[in-house]
Image (cartoon, rainbow, N blue to C red):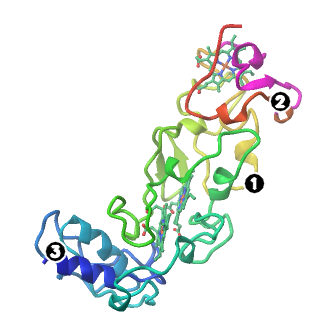
Amino acid sequence: MWALGFVLAWVAWTCAGNGPSDGAAGGAAAPVGGATGAAGGAGSGGAGAAGGSGGEAGGADGAAGTGGAVGCGGAAEGGACATPCWGCHGTEQSFAPPPDTDGNVGTTYRGVGAHQSHLAASSWHLQVPCTECHLVPAKPVWDPQVPTHQNGIVDLSWGPVAMGGIFDGQTLTCSYTYCHGTTLGPDPDGKSSIRTPQWTAVDGSQKACGAACHSLPPGGTHDPSPKCEDCHGEVIAAFAPDDPAASAWANAALHVNGKGESQEP
Ligand code: HEC
Ligand code: HEC
Ligand code: HEC
């Protein structure tokens, strides 16, 4: 039964119509090791995707999804998906949105949000890989290493720099990530920083030097001296207090890298 379920789930794979909003309606996944392979719900619009993860767990569900266009090859093609990653989201240059799985491109859509501001090469912080926020499948269809892919839910799981985090699906804010200052002490009196950034507000406000992730310098037990380069010379070459964004970096790839490089002045 397992093998049958698996094949059915694979065949039922669809490319269109399995976005998070309409893909979650497959049958309930069989328990791990369960023997109910072919049994499953006939959900609409992408239940096939939900079926995929059930297959790995030991019993396929949602084998008979309807509503999604068949685009990833059926039995005739041996179940292989001819659709590249960017056939469903992102582009050939970046598999991350935009466009998201519904085709949206604007950053105010939650599927798009601040993806590219994190992923693009940066002059002031470590370039962020997908794996800081998601597990990434190596294969476009069913990757047994990442059963959460195409399960109808956008899964977030944090990497070694982010260290952890909570994405609030109602407010679309992110909290408790290292990158946005969660490990730092409270801001000094009269200063503030944004520890719960809004994923869909991509207007520059959440990367303003000194007002976004930490004050200059951070508060709490941190030394109050503003001469950052005295102690963080490996990271920053010359701090410009009057125009912090114009500061010269020694090695910007060490900024927001999960470690505090510091030495005695
Ligand atoms: C800084 C964290 C972060 C990084 C880095 C990141 N993502 Fe995301 N991703 C998110 C968030 C947040 C969402 C929206 C979650 C939600 O809607 O519940 C999301 C959603 C998605 C979605 C679903 C879009 C939709 O239509 O709902 C895809 C696909 C995706 N990411 C792919 C990627 C890929 C591929 C990469 C790397 C090239 C990547 N992401 C990097 C945070 C990130
Ligand atoms: C057949 C369509 C399709 C293909 C092909 C595809 N994805 Fe996705 N991907 C989705 C959908 C739909 C989601 C939305 C969330 C979900 O269902 O898991 C998603 C979500 C993601 C996410 C966000 C984390 C998650 O699992 O929710 C990442 C990262 C991702 N895809 C990477 C990739 C990569 C890398 C490839 C190519 C190796 C790829 N995807 C190929 C449809 C696809
Ligand atoms: C006198 C030495 C000294 C000076 C000057 C200094 N720092 Fe620090 N900083 C440290 C030390 C030591 C740590 C690690 C311990 C701590 O967090 O207090 C640190 C930690 C940090 C961290 C946390 C790094 C991490 O990854 O957790 C940030 C951010 C930071 N400093 C920013 C600044 C900025 C911005 C300035 C200048 C406006 C500055 N510091 C000036 C000594 C200094």
Quadrant location, the C terminus? top right
Location of residue 186 in the rendering, given as x and y in whole percent from the top left corner: 59, 25
Looking at the picture, tell me which residue is in the foreground, 109 or 91. 91
- Circle 3: element type: helix
Quadrant location, the N terminus? bottom left
At 34% from the left and 84% from the top, the residue drawn is 78
In the image, which disc is placed on residue 248? 2
Task: Judge left or right: residue 248 versus residue 1.
Answer: right
Going from N to C along the chain, the mark reached first, 3 or 1, is 3
Residues at marks 2 and 3, CA–CA distance in whole angstroms: 59 Å
Q: Nearer the viewer, mark 2 or mark 3?
A: 3
Looking at the picture, tell me which residue is in the foreground, 225 or 13. 13
Q: Is residue 94 visible?
A: yes
Above or below, 57 against 257 in this view is below
Residue bearing mark 1: 203
Amino acid at pointer 3: Trp
Q: Residues within 10 Å of mark 2 (few under 14, many from 20)?
A: some
Residues at marks 3 and 1, CA–CA distance in whole angstroms: 49 Å
